[in-house]
Amino acid sequence: AEGLNLCTSGSATSCEECLLIHPKCAWCSKEEFGSTKSITSRCDFLQNLITNGCDGAIENPSSSISVVKNVPLSTKGSGQTHLDVTQIMPQKVSLNLRPGDKTSFRVQVRQVEDYPVDLYYLMDLSLSMNDDLDNIRNLGTKLAEEMRKLTSNFRLGFGSFVDKNISPFSYTAPRYQNNPCTGYKLFPSCVPSFGFRHLLSLTDKVDRFNEEVQKQKVSRNRDAPEGGFDAILQAAVCKEKIGWRKEASHLLVFTTDDVPHIALDGKLGGLVQPHDGQCHLNEANEYSASSQLDYPSLALLGEKLAENNIHLIFAVTKGHYMLYKNFTALIPGTTVEILHKDSKNIIELIVKAYNSIRSKVELTVWDSPEDIGLTFTATCQDGLSYPGLRKCGDLKIGDTVSFEVAVEARSCPAEETSHAFTIKPAGFRDTLEVVVTYNCLCDCTSHAAPASSKCSGNGTYACGLCQCDTGYLGARCECEEGASGDMHQAMCREAEGKPLCSGRGECSCNQCLCYESEFGNIYGPFCECDDFSCARYKGVLCSGHGECHCGECKCHAGYIGDNCNCSTETDSCVSSDGQMCSGRGSCVCGKCQCTEPGAFGETCEKCPTCPGVCSTKRDCIECKLFNSGRLADNQTCQKHCKDEIITTVDVLETDDPNALLCAYPVNDCIMKFTYLELASGKSNLTVLKEPVCSSAPSAVTIVLAVIGSVVLIGIILLALWKLLVTIHDRREFDRFQSERSRARYEMASNPLYRKPISTHNIEFTFNKLNRSYNGTVD
């Protein structure tokens, strides 16, 4: 075996211990096995034991499987004997498991045609469902007609619920006892609230369903949530009163327009006792523990629905669809459909949900022991395997799907222990019983010889080893404890308190016999040394540059360190310019550690942000493109510039933020290039084909430019002066016009001329005949 040998490293001291280490470990029970100077492990891989000469005396049990009952799958459901219908194969298997050794078997499931159906309709009769009640008064007849298209054997039952008749869930004041709707103008009359009421047991007489529905009246509770989960649990566990048949598919349709109460809500009403999961229907078929027990939890609902093979269909209004959709993830075998506010689509909803249920198969596991591991692989109609999946969808009636079930025991229980668990498709009555026994004992143990001469008469010989009696020691029980016994033990310990032979050998009287190891040699007077437990570097012992001696690396010349990974050579740190790490770092263990910010590379030669980097790259450009500069010698240029990729362009692009723009003078021109470090470690230099040059302007041009500038400035100043004068004149004219309009005389009249006639108004008052008059005289 390659790699770590789990069998030998486990230090098993008996055959049973060996079998627990790994399913591929085997035990050699041969008396003479291994050398006399060391202990060859009897626990090893099978091939290793055979190689070491133990052929014919090997204990290597394996897991096995036996099919106990395997009745073929049925094709049709309805017939003379419904109990003979088989939808899962096989029906019983027996497993004998060795710990860690997986064994697998295949399970086939088929939903047969024309399978009997029991449907129990559970309706919310709170006040908001009044219009729904009117629309389902003839539901039985219509639903039976549709369901008989799917099965010839259909039965229908009916029950209703509101909520617990205690405060704060319902109206409990005396005035509401007989009519909770008292004072409610929109609906003044309704029946008292109740938890759950079973009204009609499952029957094929659908007219009775219609009769019961027509008798019903709605009730009124105080809070918005309903007590529907109480009703679901009672409908599931009261199977005798409901009338669930063993040979039928069980559908429970739950209709409501609001959210449900769940476990712990009952504490609001003083109900602290958890639900016991039992049937509590009284003689009147009403839930009698409504005011004593809390609402059931989702886990309890799921357990009881699965236990009684019931498919739960949530028919809820659109506003609560997502809440109940989340419930389906917690309750296996449950579906949810959207119900119209008046329940007009209830028949289509039920048929759709039934077809959805019949189109999928999901395996569930019951009573699985804790020390058993199960993995599933589904093979659905597409013929593909889906590891880890235990369900198939998009099936048609009569389709067969299969599941490979792998079973593994994780440990060994007490002798003669057996366990059993059940595998069943969700909602099916058919089950597969799996019985598990454990293969944990070696055959050689049953042939143990007490007081064997092979053990000096002082122990029991079993499976190739001596199990010494009390007071005796040694591989053959040849040493006696007592005054000398402690001495024998002490001579096998490196120091007081340490294990015998360092835990890597056996003490035979006064001498350690070290175990053999596939990793190397174990040696020393106390088996304290080996040549494989030294420090490693990248998985290599002593980095491949030293030898391991008793847990310590002895490094070869030129290497130091605990694991010999540090080279003392500095040649690899010298950069192409002859400097140590390009002057930007230090050489540690034969590698450069760059200290200059931005520097990198094997010799810190790359540093886009370092000062002088442009001049360094300039040397490479000059020597490679123009064969000039201080590196003009071809060999020197190739050595120093081996990682530079130089490209010439007509127009230099400078929009790359990672590229550094460099320039240097060439005669009277400027040569420009960009420098960019690539991920490969090379440098990309993009250089202009020709340097950028600018010609000097002539004297005539300068004179003309000066004259033109003076003239232009003069014109601008004259225009500015003219503009200011114009603005001033306009302001003065506007002021003159304003004063002229305020003058008291016309321009054409003489201010000294007066008219010859003047008119004066004199106000007076006089009495005449005791009357007063006012007037004027000109």
Image (cartoon, helix red, strand yellow):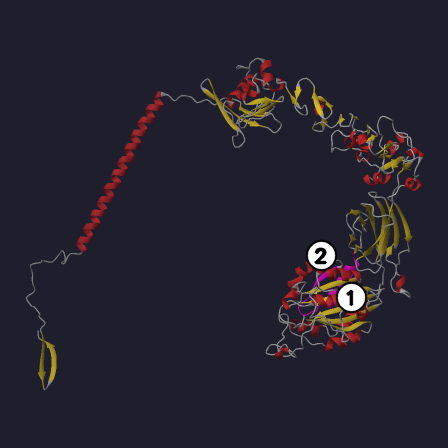
Dot 2 amino acid type = Ala
Is residue 279 visible in this depiction of the protein?
A: yes
* Viewer-side residue, 769 vs 684: 684
Residue 393, given in percent of the width and then of the height, sits at 77, 54
* Viewer-side residue, 702 vs 436: 436
**Within the image, what quadrant is residue 333 found in?**
bottom right
- Secondary element at tag 1: helix
Residue 516, given in percent of the width and then of the height, sits at 82, 29
Q: Quadrant of the N terminus?
A: top right
**Within the image, what quadrant is residue 705 found in?**
top left
**Eye-nearest disc, 2 or 1:** 1
For mark 2, does the 10 Å Cα neighbourhood hold few (<14), some (14 to 19), or many (20 or more) residues? few
Number of the label disc, if any, that sits on residue 252: none
Q: CA distance from mark 2 to mark 1?
A: 21 Å
What stretch of residues is rendered in magenta?
334-360
Residue 19 appears left or right of 759: right
Image vertical order of residue 504 relative to residue 587, above or below: below
Is residue 90 visible in this depiction of the protein?
A: no
Q: Which residue is mark 2?
A: 329
* Viewer-side residue, 522 vs 21: 522
The residue sitting at the front extreme is: 483
* Viewer-side residue, 11 vs 759: 11
Q: Which residue is mark 1?
A: 237
